[in-house]
Image (cartoon, rainbow, N blue to C red):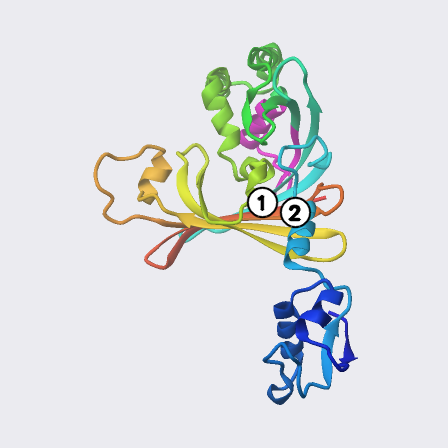
Amino acid sequence: MIFFEYKVRNGDTLPSVSSRLNMSAEELKQFHNSLCLKMHRVWFENLNGVERLMVPLNFKTGKKRELEKKKMLSSYSLSDSFLMPVYHVSETFESSRENPLAIHYDVQFDIRTDQKSDPYILTFRQNNFKTGDYIPDNKTENLTLACIKSIMPVDFSIDPDGYITGPADHQHLVEKFKNQRAELEEFFTGERSELYFDVFQNSISNQTYFLEQFKSTLLFQTLFPEMDWFRKNSVWSENFFFLKNSFPVQCSMRTEHEDLDHDLLTTVLRGGITDACSLQELKKGVRSNKPVGDPVSGEIILQYITHKETKKLFSAEASLSLSQENSLLQKHTLKITQ
């Protein structure tokens, strides 16, 4: 902070000087003492024997700083301008038993208001998949991607807090795949392909299961936070999915903010698992009725860089890690950029 040396005049006191600066006597004393050697510090309000005071320019009270901070934070409710239209996504999967796997793809968003039902309708599209440095080219990978592409884009209903409530028109989504299935079957032939089509159609026909398929991904957990998370001032509990298609586990969370520059603000949500569960339970997606003898530890970090004025999401990073006895079992990281 910029400051100057104020020459103490006859009759000056710490409160009289600080009042002219719109700060308290205690704030002025702390500011002055932080810049001076011990022998030149101020201890009393009368300023007897004090020749100069270190005085700040453009001082902001704690209350004013807090108000400015709140203005920089994301809105209390979801805005149709929070997300950019397109993001590039990179995900990395690490395991103690397998080689790391990296995938890359693009996501497209269109959020609009809907007066008839939920406040917002999200149109979501996922494309341009790459695994490592190559584009998937074997038949199994192409079959999976072809089924996913056949239902894209997907419309979701979102409430004002940023919570996805379900597909906007679930029946239309199912019919969309059914109408394209015959064309897919002409290209992907054989009993194995037919079986996969049946499994895929059954999975999207179950609305609850279909929704969990998306909401349990790290991508959706990162891009669709509940908006009040950004304004939390104390530790709170929240449920997160550490593995796709598993069950959510309770985490103790805290929010941190870092003022990057004039335009951007970093918000970090950091927490750890407080539920007692095993890695086997998470992988199976079913909790056991028996006591957990060797619970797994988990850490989640969600980092957002948002524009202070527009509140748009500039970029984001996330990580989920599971460990046991200080040994890392697996880690999933995600990076979202423009």
Rendered residue at 74%/74% (across/down): 55
Check residue 193 in the rendering and tell me which mark sits there, or answer none. Answer: none
User: Dot 2 surroundings within 10 Å: few (below 14), some, or many (20 or more)?
Assistant: some
From the image, which quarter does the C terminus lie in?
top right
Residue placed under numbered mark 1 in the picture: 231
Please state the extent of the stretch shown in magenta in the rendering.
125-149
For the residues labelled 2 and 1, say whether their Cβ atoms are less than 8 Å apart: yes
Q: Is residue 191 visible?
A: no
Residue placed under numbered mark 2 in the picture: 70
Q: Is residue 2 visible?
A: yes
Pinpoint residue 326: horizontal percent, then vertical percent: 36, 59
- On whether residue 97 falls in the magenta region, the answer is no
Please give left or right for residue 277 compared with residue 137 in the image: left
Element carrying mark 2: helix
Q: Nearer the viewer, residue 126 or 292?
A: 292
Rendered residue at 67%/79% (across/down): 35
Pinpoint residue 74: horizontal percent, then vertical percent: 65, 42
Kind of residue at badge 1: Arg
C-alpha span from label 2 to label 1: 8 Å
Pinpoint residue 51: horizontal percent, then vertical percent: 73, 86
User: Dot 1 surroundings within 10 Å: few (below 14), some, or many (20 or more)?
Assistant: some
Kind of residue at badge 2: Lys
